[in-house]
Image (cartoon, rainbow, N blue to C red):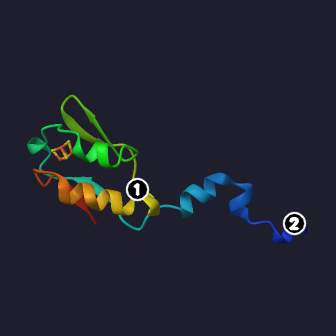
Amino acid sequence: MSSKNVSPLFIFPEFRRFFNRSSISVTIQNYDNCTGCGICKDICPTVFAVDDDKVRILRQPTEEEREFVRLAKTTCPYDCIVVS
Ligand code: SF4
């Protein structure tokens, strides 16, 4: 195999994580309204965590997590999650 044919995504896994980022971003609004119920964390535990009865974003979602984040947004009982 020629080195010309090797994808940089194969050589540098960090590139894969970078390019695998979703075009959506998630933020929290109405932070004081969050009860820490954990529904969002149960739906997408790689993006949401709950500490001290408040939600925390661990990282921005990947493409594969996009629909889970959207589901968490629509399921949050206090409309705390913003997906843009
Ligand atoms: S679902 Fe909403 S209220 Fe519940 S922990 Fe997540 S952000 Fe907070």
User: Which is more toward the observer, 47 or 75?
Assistant: 75
* Image region (quadrant) for ligand 1: top left
Q: Residue at (10%, 42%) from the top-left corner?
A: 32
User: Which is more toward the observer, 68 or 19?
Assistant: 68
- Residue matched to label 1: 61
On the rendered structure, is 57 left or right of 33? Answer: right
Q: Residue at (55%, 59%) from the top-left corner?
A: 18
Q: Nearer the viewer, mark 2 or mark 1?
A: 1
Q: Please rate how many residues cluster around mark 1, counting C-alpha atoms within 10 Å: few if below 14, some from 14 to 19, many from 20.
A: many
Q: Which element is circle 2 on?
A: helix
Q: Position of residue 46 (x, y in %)?
A: 40, 45
Question: Which amino acid lies under the numbered mark 2 shown in the image of this protein?
Answer: Ser
Q: Residue at (39%, 53%) from the top-left corner?
A: 60
Q: Quadrant of the N terminus?
A: bottom right
Q: Position of residue 57 (x, y in %)?
A: 32, 45
Task: Write down the quadrant of residue 49 in the picture.
Answer: top left
Task: Write down the quadrant of residue 73 in the picture.
Answer: bottom left
- Residue matched to label 2: 3
Q: How many marks?
A: 2
| Residue extending furthest toward the top | 52
| Measured Cα–Cα span from mark 2 to mark 1 | 32 Å
Q: Which element is circle 1 on?
A: loop
